[in-house]
Image (cartoon, rainbow, N blue to C red):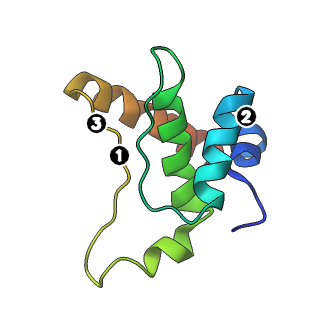
Amino acid sequence: MPKLKCSDFAKHVLNTPLWPKQEEILDEYFGGGKSHACWALGRRSGKTLMASIAAVYACFVLESSYKRKVRKNENSRICLLRSRKQLQAQSTKEREMVHRYYC
């Protein structure tokens, strides 16, 4: 597990505070060696936000470990898709987070 926990990455790098349960879910997922997650959470519980943070965290903090899992000349993606409209909103949130991280 990397030294920077996902919840700390969200708080300090992305400037996005999380609720305690969101911190627990993300840190447990990335700290437990899991490769898939299915979050069955209620409405307005922050699933899209957590998926956005998880994707950006995996791309920047865990980049080297994920690169080892991808075959040569292939791409890897992490996504949450429920509807086309949510996919567009998800992509916008990821772009905003990446922009904040580099700018």
Label located before the other in sequence (3 or 2): 2
Residues at badges 3 and 2 in contact (C-beta under 8 Å)?
no
Residue depicted at x 78% and y 42%: 12
Quadrant holding the N terminus: bottom right
Question: Quick check: 6 left or right of 56?
Answer: right
Circles 1 and 3: CB distance less than 8 Å?
A: yes
Nearest the eye: 3 or 56: 3
Q: Hey, what amino acid is under mark 2?
A: Asn
| Label 1 – label 3 distance at C-alpha | 6 Å
Query: How far across and how far down the image is residue 48, in percent?
Result: 45, 30
Q: Is residue 53 visible?
A: yes
> What is the x, y in percent for residue 63?
54, 69
Mark 1 belongs to which amino acid?
Cys
Residue pushed farthest top?
A: 43
Give the labeled residue for mark 1.
79
Q: For mark 2, does the 10 Å Cα neighbourhood hold few (<14), some (14 to 19), or many (20 or more) residues? A: few
Q: Which residue is mark 3?
A: 81
CA neighbours of label 1 inside 10 A, class few (<14), some (14 to 19), many (20+): few
Q: Secondary structure at mark 1?
A: loop
Query: Where is mark 2, residue-wise?
Result: 15
Residue type at numbered disc 3: Leu
- Between the C-alphas of marks 3 and 2, the distance is 24 Å
User: In the image, what residue occupies the spot 48% across and 29% down?
Assistant: 47
88 displayed left or right of 31: left
Total numbered badges shown on the rendered structure: 3
The answer for how far apart the CA atoms under marks 1 and 2 are is 21 Å
Residue at horizontal 29 percent and vertical 85 percent from the top? 72
